[in-house]
Image (cartoon, helix red, strand yellow):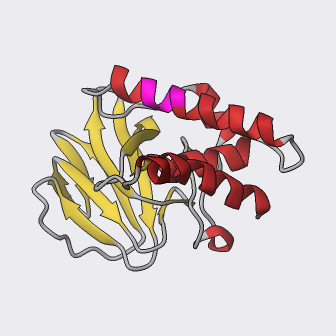
Amino acid sequence: MRLFLILLLMLLIPAVTTGSFPSQQEMIRVALLKGGESVRIDGNGILATDDAGEPLRLGFPVDVRRGKGGVVINGRTLRGLKISAPVFVQVNGKGYRGVIEVSSADKGLLVVNELPLEEYLVGLINCEISSQWPMEAVKAQAVIARSYAIFQKEARKNAPYQLESPFWIRSMKGATSKTAGRPAVSRRLPARY
């Protein structure tokens, strides 16, 4: 908990020293699943919309399959699906914060998690290092993680997601009810934060 508070302060210090907070949170897009033929979505209080932003009435859990021209849900084909929930959305049994997008790609389904960069970084640092590490090591890791994420975001700005390497897969967890009120990080399946 102490490490979490320190990291949160480290992330807020740049905003305080410049005298203003950003008006809009910077977001990061993380590929959770690439190439699967189906995915199961579940959770409480889920809002699901189609690619045009129209709300969908779905009973959860729901299985989403890849189909010709998009994704298939309950026999209905859509170009894409966006899902969000107050706490987290379960994707194949793993919880994720932010917005989940499901679309059809060349080699199967593409599931992307979009969440605030700051929440991503706090969760990532908490997963990567021990609270026993010296504070300078924690700070260095935070700088490295932020630099890498921002570099990837710029390098892949026109891609459907910015992060998806094996490094990120190994270092992240999914959301659970124990961490529901805390910032978290996303990762490729299987994942918990």
**Is residue 1 depicted above or below 108 in this figure?**
below
Tell me the quarter of the image containing the N terminus: bottom right
At 42% from the left edge and 70% from the top edge, which residue is drawn? 61
Farthest-out residue, right: 132
At 42% from the left edge and 62% from the top edge, which residue is drawn? 41
Between 90 and 134, the residue placed more toward the observer is 134
Magenta stretch containing residue 150, yes or no? yes
**Is residue 59 depicted above or below 63 in this figure?**
below
Tell me the quarter of the image containing the C terminus: bottom right
Farthest-out residue, top: 155
Q: Position of residue 182 (x, y in %)?
A: 60, 67
**Is residue 186 depicted above or below 150 in this figure?**
below
| Magenta span of residues | 147-151
Asked whether residue 2 appears in the rendered view, the answer is yes
At 46% from the left edge and 72% from the top edge, which residue is drawn? 43
Q: Position of residue 88 (x, y in %)?
A: 48, 67
Magenta stretch containing residue 24, yes or no? no
Between 27 and 48, the residue placed more toward the observer is 27
Q: Position of residue 118 (x, y in %)?
A: 49, 50
**Is residue 17 depicted above or below 98 in this figure?**
above
State which quadrant residue 82 falls in. Answer: bottom left
129 with respect to 157 (left or right): right
Between 76 and 159, the residue placed more toward the observer is 159
Give the prevailing secondary structure in the magenta stretch.
Answer: helix
